[in-house]
Image (cartoon, coloured by chain):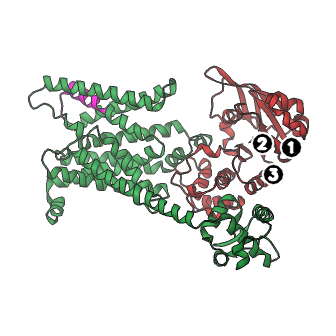
Chain colours: A green, B red
């Protein structure tokens, strides 16, 4: 363990791998948040698969293995794939998911076809293009890392600059348009940055699993926070952590492609978040549900509040939750929350509750039907 | 001099896939009225609002606000979309959403500052939601969501408000609060145009009405437009229950 940490800082290869994967993780975590919130998660999948023929064609035309050249090809093909999805969806009756599926599989098929041709015609060394399928972090050079850092810095700077616009368009597109923003331009910029985030990760993660980088950190982050900034920050952190740990694990083993290892790490984070997030986790929701159901007596508590107000001039006199709890057999707090949702009670100050006029009416109606107060109230 | 019309719509026609949704609509809305747009489902009420705002491209027709095109007057126009048109699970607090109302004034890149936050708090106060400023929007009831959307529009400090079904799915307390707010806006000389689904309350809540069913059936002050004959034309046979009034 200590040795690994030591190597992380002083071993040339390992340092590159860690820094490179962290950069990829941060960038795709940030932009993936917008993809997920705009319900365009699968666009990332189409883009990354569509990039494969771009890589192959770039190699065929230039016979260069320079990663910048190959990634430029990937970028063009990814943008082409994304545009085709949008154009097909807007101009035909084909739904977006069908358009995504068609683009993804046809581009990917073409990519595999071209890769096979390259293997036949190229020298015995081939081009090493197969690593683009499942990714290989251990080949990362310092120059690759600098390229990554440059593009990631550019994309993050643009995101920070247009933060307000990205947020607005992601939440309410039509409203953004009525405020005079060029919504199509903002949407195009977000998509272009997502393409960039995907493309710079391809060599390390591979086209098949790159979409996990876009979706998984964002989905996990969504579980833990209530603000967009919180979500984006956390998503960047999750992306970085899983990128680094996945790349390190795969580099330590021979012949283990990086993409699958990273995805396994990410999936663990996602599952943990889905289950155990304190506010949105499945476990806490179940516990909360059970607690609420156990102790809920909406009508009873409404009557309790109503009868408490009999000691005062106004039927809408406020009482502290502890006063209400003192006369109620059920959980006053839980029941009051439900009553508030129904618009029958409201909070004056913190935890000081009173009936709304609608609440007074409702309480009178219930009492009339029953012909008196509920037994637990009269008994107290 | 005669006051300019708040909204002037001429020959507006909108079609989806060659099927007309709105047919040759003229509507001249004077300033300071509280106008309800009513009609059966699929009558084109939402489409009308959206095409007036330039969100849908009409097949024909012109729309002006205070005799100018929308883009020239957009800072004086506020839109309240249907509550269900957005994802309320979006990671944002109530204050975040209301602040979006200031973005139009801010323009590109500039961030909301102290002044904008103050305006946002004031708007929340006006809809009785200031206690909820820091609450996540997924924890709101339907009526509270609607109030947040109204607060967002109020921040814009507009002269014309276009609202799509602000009374849909809200509790009676909220309905009365929203109504008071709309009437208050009108008193200040603002023009408020509301897509409304409840025929029973039109006469009580609004002073002007547009009856719509693909074509414009009636338009003008409530008393002169809400006749049985007009309602039958708008709703077909289904409006029989209204005659009991």
- Of the two numbered discs 2 and 3 in the rendering, the one whose residue sits closer to the viewer: 2
Q: What residue appears at the point 27 percent right and 36 percent down from the top-left corner?
A: A71
* Mark 2 lies on residue: B198
Counting other residues with Cα less than 10 Å from the Cα at mark 3, is it few (<14), some (14-19), or many (20 or more)? Answer: some
Q: Does the magenta stretch include residue A219?
A: no
| The stretch drawn in magenta includes residue A53 | yes
Q: Of all residues shown, which one is farthest toward the top?
A: B18
Picture mark count:
3
- Mark in the foreground, 3 or 1: 1
Question: Between disc 2 and disc 1, whose residue precedes?
Answer: 2
Compare marks 3 and 1 and give the one earlier in the sequence: 3
Q: Which of B41 and A56 is in front in this view?
A: B41
* Dot in front, 2 or 1: 2
| Residue A205 x, y percent position in the rendering | 26, 43
Secondary structure category for the residue under label 3: helix
CB atoms at circles 2 and 3 under 8 Å apart?
no
Say which element carries label 2.
loop
Which residue has dot 1 on it?
A: B203
Q: How crowded is mark 1: few (under 14 residues within 10 Å), some or many (20 or more)?
A: some
Q: Where is residue A284 in the image (x, y as percent from the top left)?
A: 46, 62
Magenta segment range?
Answer: A51-65
Q: Quadrant of the N terminus of chain A?
A: bottom left
Q: Residue at x 48, y 50 (%)?
A: A163
Question: Sequence order check: which comes first, mark 2 or mark 3?
Answer: 3
Residue linked to disc 3: B183
Q: Is label 1 in a helix, a strand or a loop?
A: helix
Q: Is residue B33 visible?
A: no
């Amino acid at each position: 363990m200590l040795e690994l940490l030591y190597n992380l800082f002083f071993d040339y290869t390992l340092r590159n791998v860690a820094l490179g994967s962290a950069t990829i993780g941060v960038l795709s975590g940030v932009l993936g948040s917008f993809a997920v919130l705009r319900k365009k998660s699968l666009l990332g999948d189409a883009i990354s698969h569509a990039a494969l023929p771009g890589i192959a064609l770039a190699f065929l035309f230039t016979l260069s293995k320079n990663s910048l050249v190959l990634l430029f090809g990937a970028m063009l093909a990814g943008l082409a794939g994304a545009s085709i999805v949008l154009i097909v969806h807007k101009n035909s009756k084909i739904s977006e998911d069908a358009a995504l599926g068609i683009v993804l599989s046809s581009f990917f098929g073409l990519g595999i076809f071209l890769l096979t041709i390259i293997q036949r015609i190229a020298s015995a060394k081939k081009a090493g293009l197969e690593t683009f399928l499942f990714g290989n972090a251990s080949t990362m050079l310092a120059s690759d890392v600098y390229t990554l850092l440059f593009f990631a810095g550019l994309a993050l700077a643009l995101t920070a600059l247009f933060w307000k616009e990205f947020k607005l368009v992601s939440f309410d597109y039509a409203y953004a348009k009525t405020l005079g923003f060029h919504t199509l331009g903002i949407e195009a910029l977000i998509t272009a940055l997502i393409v960039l985030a995907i493309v710079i990760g391809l060599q390390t993660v591979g086209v098949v699993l790159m979409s996990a980088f876009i979706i998984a950190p964002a989905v996990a982050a969504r579980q833990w926070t209530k603000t967009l900034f919180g979500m984006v920050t956390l998503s960047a952190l999750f992306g970085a952590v899983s990128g680094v740990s996945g790349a390190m694990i795969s580099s330590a083993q021979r012949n283990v492609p990086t993409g699958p290892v990273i995805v396994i790490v990410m999936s663990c984070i996602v599952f943990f978040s889905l289950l155990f997030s304190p506010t949105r986790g499945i476990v806490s929701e179940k516990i909360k549900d059970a607690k609420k159901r156990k102790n809920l007596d909406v009508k009873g508590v409404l009557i309790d509040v109503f009868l408490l107000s009999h000691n005062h001039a106004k039927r809408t006199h406020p009482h502290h939750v502890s006063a209400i709890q003192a006369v109620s057999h059920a959980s006053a707090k839980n029941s009051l929350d439900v009553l508030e949702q129904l618009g029958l009670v409201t909070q004056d100050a913190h935890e000081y509750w009173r009936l709304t006029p609608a609440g007074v009416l409702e309480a009178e109606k219930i009492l009339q039907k029953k012909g008196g107060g509920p037994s637990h109230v009269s008994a107290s | 001099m005669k006051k300019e019309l708040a909204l002037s719509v001429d020959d507006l026609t909108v079609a989806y896939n060659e099927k007309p949704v709105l047919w040759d609509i003229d509507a001249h809305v004077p300033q300071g009225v509280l106008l309800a747009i009513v009609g059966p489902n699929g009558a084109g009420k939402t489409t009308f609002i959206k095409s007036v705002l330039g969100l849908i491209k009409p097949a024909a027709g012109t729309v002006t606000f205070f005799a100018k095109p929308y883009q020239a007057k957009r800072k004086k126009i506020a839109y309240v979309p249907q509550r269900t048109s957005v994802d309320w699970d979006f990671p944002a607090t109530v204050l975040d959403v209301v602040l979006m109302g200031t973005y139009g004034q801010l323009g590109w890149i500039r961030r909301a500052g102290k002044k904008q936050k103050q305006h946002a708090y004031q708007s929340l106060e006006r809809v009785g939601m200031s206690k909820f400023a820091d609450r996540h929007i997924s924890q709101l009831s339907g009526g509270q969501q609607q109030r947040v959307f109204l607060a967002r529009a109020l921040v814009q400090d507009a002269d014309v408000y276009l609202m799509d079904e602000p009374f849909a799915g809200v509790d009676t307390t909220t309905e009365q609060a929203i109504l008071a707010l709309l009437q208050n806006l009108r008193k200040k000389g603002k023009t408020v145009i509301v897509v409304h689904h409840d025929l029973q309350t039109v006469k009580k809540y609004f002073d002007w009405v547009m009856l719509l069913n693909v074509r414009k059936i009636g338009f003008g002050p409530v008393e002169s437009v809400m006749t049985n004959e007009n309602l039958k034309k708008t709703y077909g046979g289904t409006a029989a229950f209204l005659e009991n009034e």
